[in-house]
Image (spheres, rainbow, N blue to C red):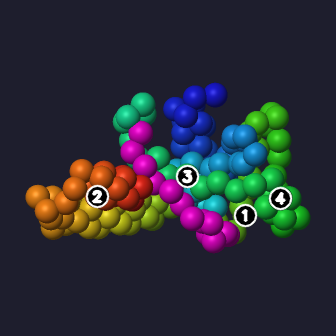
Amino acid sequence: MTIQEKLTLQSNDCKNCYLFKEGMFYKVYNEGAFMFQEISKYKVNAKYLKVVNTTLYSMGFPQSVLNKFRIQYKISDIDDKILKFTINNVNFKHDKYEQWCTTFAVNEMKSTTLILNQIKEYPLASKTPIEVYMWLYQLQKQL
């Protein structure tokens, strides 16, 4: 299943979260991550994907966490790689979702500004090629 198909499945049914098995983990995307964050404290990752020309919001967790949620929530198997997770006490509101998405854009802008400042302030002329390489390597890890 492509990422576009996963996003379409989730966006067409905002009353449920769709969990996709990817390796050893389950992942939820966009609207599903928004709703799932209401009941868990897992970190949501945001990154722009050229393939779908949009920002992808995702959250991942191992099978053991899913087993804990099975006790409290209704989870039904669609197939061996997709689960449908129903959260009864969370109502999806599109305007709140849009607002939630903008918080990631603000955080991404702050991160970009910090990196640009590091580049501007780096004393390139007084460093050796190895020092510049190591600095660039550390900067790259921040992206």
The secondary element bearing badge 3 is classed as strand
Label 3 vs label 2: CA separation? 35 Å
Label 1 vs label 3: CA separation? 21 Å
Which comes before the other along the chain, label 1 or label 3?
3
Check the image and report above or below for 16 versus 37: above
Q: Nearer the viewer, mark 2 or mark 4?
A: 2
User: Which of these two is toward me, 21 or 135?
Assistant: 135
Q: Look at label 2 and name its amino acid.
A: Glu
User: Which of these two is toward me, 26 or 98?
Assistant: 26
The stretch in magenta equals 37-49
Q: Look at label 3 and name its amino acid.
A: Ser
Q: Nearer the viewer, mark 4 or mark 3?
A: 4
Looking at the image, the residue that sits furthest to the left is 125
Residue 58 tag number: 3
Q: Quadrant of the N terminus?
A: top right
Q: Which residue is mark 1?
A: 88
Label 4 vs label 1: CA separation? 22 Å
Check whether the beta carbons of the residues at disc 1 and disc 2 lie within 8 A of each other: no
Q: Which residue is mark 4?
A: 64
Q: Which residue is mark 2?
A: 131
Which comes before the other along the chain, label 1 or label 2?
1
Q: Look at label 4 and name its amino acid.
A: Ser
* Quadrant position of residue 121: bottom left
Which comes before the other along the chain, label 3 or label 2?
3
Check whether the beta carbons of the residues at disc 4 and disc 1 lie within 8 A of each other: no
Asked whether residue 114 appears in the rendered view, the answer is yes
Asked whether residue 35 is drawn in magenta, I would say: no
Asked whether residue 43 is drawn in magenta, I would say: yes
* Number of numbered discs on residues: 4
Task: Please state the horizontal and vertical placement of residue 24, each as a whole percent of the image.
Answer: 75, 45
